[in-house]
Amino acid sequence: MQNATMETATIATYEVGDRVADFELPDVSGKPRRLSDIAGEWTLLYFTTTWCPYCTAEAPFLETEVTEPFRDRGLRTVVVDVKESPEVARQLPDRFGWTMPFLVDAHGEVSERFAPKKEGLPPEVAVINAHFILDSELVIRFAEYLNMERFDIRATAVTQALDALTGGEGQ
Amino acid sequence: MTPPGSIVLDAVGRRRGRSVEVTLTAQIPAGTHIEPHVPTEPTLIPTEVEVEVEGLEAAAVDYPEPVRKDLGFRGMALSVYEGTVRFVIRGEVAAGVEVVRGTVSYQPCVGGACLPPRSSTWEAMLKRPQEASSTARGAVSVGPSRNRSRQRSARASESMVARSSAMSEERD
């Protein structure tokens, strides 16, 4: 199994405004994929697992309703599966018919740097269902973490942010 | 120290001839719930009780009724197990079987987060009648369930101490 490789290791936990260090992770076939190679003018970076009920509830809408409406504005979505083997992780794209780049962070090395600090939760749990919108320089322009009490199956806050950043009032 | 969201199991069995009944009592920590055997949504991971001993035949499990709670998940009330719940396993054992064991696999949610699915083992020893009043306690390892492949590799590895109670053997 291929490990993640990081360009730098200077940022403990990313926040809005931080530039994400480029990283490389394998896809489910084991092919190394570098973020900068698959990123778009805008990139939605999304963290998931097969066991997260919120993720599987949102999964049917992630490509069709969150990504597609913004594809012609340069959006690419990159999904990162957290701390699962490729054999387990591939259930998600297989089940939901995703065509988006799907990377496997089997050891959680990349994911933990995107994890919010939540008391009592390990990084690989805290980062699940997190959405990050990156600009063309891989700077985080928006971040949303799972809030069980405000969970929205269609990620409306994310699509609103995408609309504002990619051509709405945010431009 | 048990990881957050881990349940504590107590196994008590009764035997009448070849018939065996094992009651598993699961103590779910305060502030934690686990998904029931039949979750509200198909995307949720069910609790499964499994019996892994050879020689226990025709085993069937009675699962408890869940409670309904509004947890903010998609604006609907969910069925969950919380507090103390009991699972009852019934089956028949072959001659010479002295121990029955198995697993309970479950996904806990603690406070504002769901945690990776995990599995706890249980074990109940068949004791002779004169030994039935004593209770055995021991360390029990925890491993992945064999039931659902999609959960198997995702389960957290942990160690915990579960209570293993002696099974009483009743004469015909």
Image: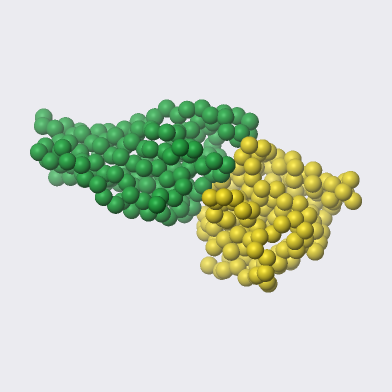
Chain colours: A yellow, B green
**Outermost residue, bottom side:** A7
Left or right of B34 in this view: B121 = left
Side of A62 where B119 appears, left or right: left
Determine whether A30 is above or below B59 in the image.
Answer: below
Where does residue B96 sit, x and y in percent of width and height? 14, 45
Q: Nearer the viewer, residue B1 or B71?
A: B1
Image quadrant in which you'd find residue B10: top left
Position of residue A43 measured from the top left corner of the image (x, y, whole percent): 76, 56
Q: Residue at x 53, y 67 (%)?
A: A1
**Could you tell me which residue is drawn at 57 percent across and 68 percent down?**
A3
Q: Position of residue A7 (x, y in %)?
A: 68, 72
Q: Number of marks in the image?
A: 0
Q: Residue at x 88, y 46 (%)?
A: A168
Q: Foreground: A12 or B18? A: A12
Residue nearest the viewer, comparing B152 with B76: B76
User: From this viewpoint, is residue A50 visible?
Assistant: no
Query: Does residue B81 show up?
Result: yes
Above-or-below relation of B57 to A76:
above
Residue A132 placement, left or right of A83: right
Relative vertical location of residue B7 with respect to residue A6 in this rendering, above or below:
above
* x 61%, y 45%: residue: A55
